[in-house]
Image (tube, rainbow, N blue to C red):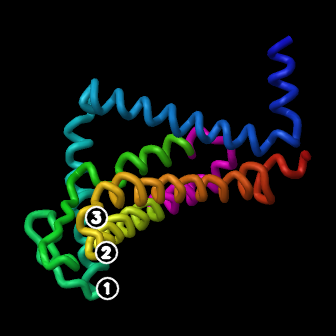
Amino acid sequence: MNKERIKEFYNNPKNQSLVDVGLFFILIFSFHILYVVWNEYMDYWPIKGVIDKLFAWASALLFNQSTWVLDHVFGMDFVTRDQSIFFINNEGTYSAVTVAPECTSLKQWMHWLFLMLIFPGPWKHKAWYIPLGLVIIEFTNVVRIVGICLFLKPFPHDFALAHDVIFKIVFYVVIFLMWMVWNDNFHRGRFSPNRSQQ
């Protein structure tokens, strides 16, 4: 009886949005748990060497992109050492933002891949939409690093607010919005292979 009710709820067109959003959150949280286990308990086994190289490459890329934007777009005065950005804040003291390997988009890239490979939709569109999503996620991370630097100029004591709250939320809002575009246009919408059957 319960299986029939679940199937009826799932197949009811009125519940499609709720079902899709529920599936989105189940996949996002499932991947988060898998990633934490793989990272903290398995130390990226069996491809730790590859993951370490990816982190190093991605953090250097993010650092170079972020400093370019700070310099060429915002004209911000700063100095760098290793992968840290130092600048004078509005209090006249130095603030610093370090682009460590953990700052990279690697986890969010994997989140996106996991979500999009499992979530329903036509593969011919996934072939271009997944890479586009990876580029958007990297762009979002550049905005995050640049945003933290700009935020610390007037608010030098609020690093945790910028890093742990504001820009972390932005990351997942962007992923959710990209998923909504996918769901509304390619899974359920006008480009869905099932649309002609509905």
Q: Residues within 10 Å of mark 2 (few under 14, many from 20)?
A: some
Q: Is residue 83 left or right of residue 165?
A: left
Q: Quadrant of residue 143?
A: bottom left
Query: For the point 37% across and 62% down, which residue is it?
Result: 141
**Is residue 133 one of those drawn in magenta?**
yes
The mark closer to the camera, 1 or 3, is: 1
Q: Vertical placement of 13 versus 170: above or below?
A: above
Q: Earlier in the sequence, mark 1 or mark 3?
A: 3
Disc 3 target residue: 62
Task: Identify the secondary structure beneath mark 1.
Answer: loop
Expressed as whole percent of the image width and height from the top left, the position of residue 4 reads 86, 18
**Is residue 171 one of those drawn in magenta?**
no
Q: Which amino acid type corresponds to the residue marked 2 in the rendered image? A: Leu
Disc 1 target residue: 74
Disc 2 target residue: 150
Q: Which amino acid type corresponds to the residue marked 1 in the rendered image? A: Phe
Q: Vertical placement of 77 versus 86: above or below?
A: below
Label 2–label 1 contact, CB within 8 A: yes
Q: How many marks?
A: 3
Expressed as whole percent of the image width and height from the top left, the position of residue 99 reads 22, 60
The stretch in magenta equals 116-134
Query: For the point 33% across and 86% down, which residue is it?
Result: 73
Task: Identify the secondary structure beneath mark 3.
Answer: helix
